[in-house]
Amino acid sequence: MDTRIVKLINKALDGTLLTHAEIVELLSVKNLSPEAFAIWQAGRQMTSQLNDGYAEVHAHIGLDAAPCPMNCQYCSFAEVNGVFTEKVTYPIEKVIQDAQDLETSGANALYLVTTVLYGKRAFLETAAQVKAALKTDIPLVANIPDFGPDYARELADIGIGGVYHVIRLGEGTYTNCKPEMRIRTIESALEAGIPVGNCIEPIGPEHDPREIADLIICARDLGVSFSGAMRRTTVPGSVFEEFGDISYGRLATYAGVIALGTGMGVKGNCSHEPSQLCAQAGANIMWASRGTDPRDTTAETTRGYSVAQVQDIWWETDWKVWDGPSRYYA
């Protein structure tokens, strides 16, 4: 075992923030090495301690699919990828039914997810109707395009309990989004009193550990409620097809490093798509899915897990399942 890696692990577990260079060292360990497994164990230890051994199921509800002009090239909705050629928007009746089903099944948070073509006014109207139809205090989370302080206050006014927002790998190069606008959106939500969920995504085999470490430090500095690791699911015909995907084994190491690298101030650690390996490495948030999904090539996702399936992952990996509204959102 590399004693340097052991020292860095113990430094993080003791509550000291790791430097950028130290996070890069952890991210660079050889796959399936003793050092990688030590990181898994340490990530699990840290997240478990911060959350009293509890894990959560969050639920994704995709509201639309469209040839999106933001052209995030790892996304099946990107106009440039040619997967979706027409706009599909689900009726409010379906969205409410999906939300109620997921709520009844025991999801701890409900995410409403849109492309830029859905529209800000339409989202407020839909979210308000979904919120009114819920029977519990389950938080409604907005996973939507960039916005500023005024819109953040409107989200808060209708009872949005959280925002999921990230600065993606390759932002501004492989997307038409600007990194500074992504950061501004996170800051706007936090200033409006809305907690923010985050993730390091979408990770592919070509990404340098320094790029990943940049985003770990960024999430930590912004003060998000949780971060984590999401692997890219490569869209056929996209510019990333030559690289392919990383394994869940490698993703688990990244999940462990992110738990250690974000430190004690970021309590939650997510992974996507759901994986027992990532659960063993410290991920305690995973998603069930309904509706549209940017990893899928059909309007109604066939990749999505149910709430019960994610709960089974927690049981199989010895996590306790949190019962009630998510602790990461208001």
Image: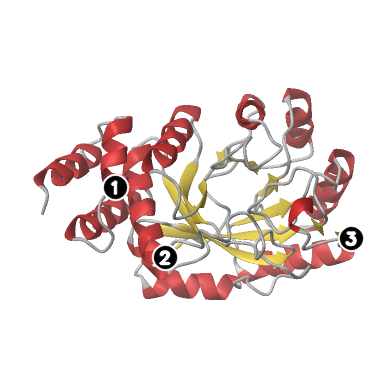
Q: Secondary structure at mark 3?
A: loop
* Residue 96 lies in quadrant: bottom right
Q: Can you see residue 279?
A: no
Q: Secondary structure at mark 1?
A: loop
Q: Amino acid at mark 3?
A: Glu
Relative height, residue 208 to residue 285 (above, below): above
Q: From the viewer's perspective, is 198 left or right of 172?
A: left
The structure residue drawn at horizontal position 81% and vertical position 62%, both measured from the top left corner, is: 84
Relative image position of residue 190 (x, y in whole percent): 60, 29
Q: To which residue does mark 3 refer?
A: 86
Identity of the residue drawn at 62% across and 37% down: 173
Q: Position of residue 44 (x, y in %)?
A: 31, 56
Q: Quadrant of the image for the C terminus?
A: top right
Work out how far the residue at label 1 is from the one at label 2, CA to CA, in angstroms: 15 Å
The reply to whether dot 2 and dot 3 touch (C-beta < 8 Å) is: no
Q: Quadrant of residue 305?
A: bottom right
In the structure shown, which secondary structural element does the residue marked by tag 2 occupy?
loop
- Mark 3 surroundings within 10 Å by alpha-carbon count, few (fewer than 14), some (14 through 19), many (20 or more): few
Type of residue at label 2? Answer: Ser
Q: Residue at x 29, y 47 (%)?
A: 28
- Determine which of the numbered discs, if any, sits on residue 283 in the image: none
Query: Residue under circle 2?
Result: 247
Between discs 3 and 1, the one toward the N terminus? 1
Q: Residues within 10 Å of mark 2 (few under 14, many from 20)?
A: few
**Is 12 on the left or on the right of 177, as rendered?**
left
Q: Which residue is mark 1?
A: 28
Residue toward you, 307 or 40: 40
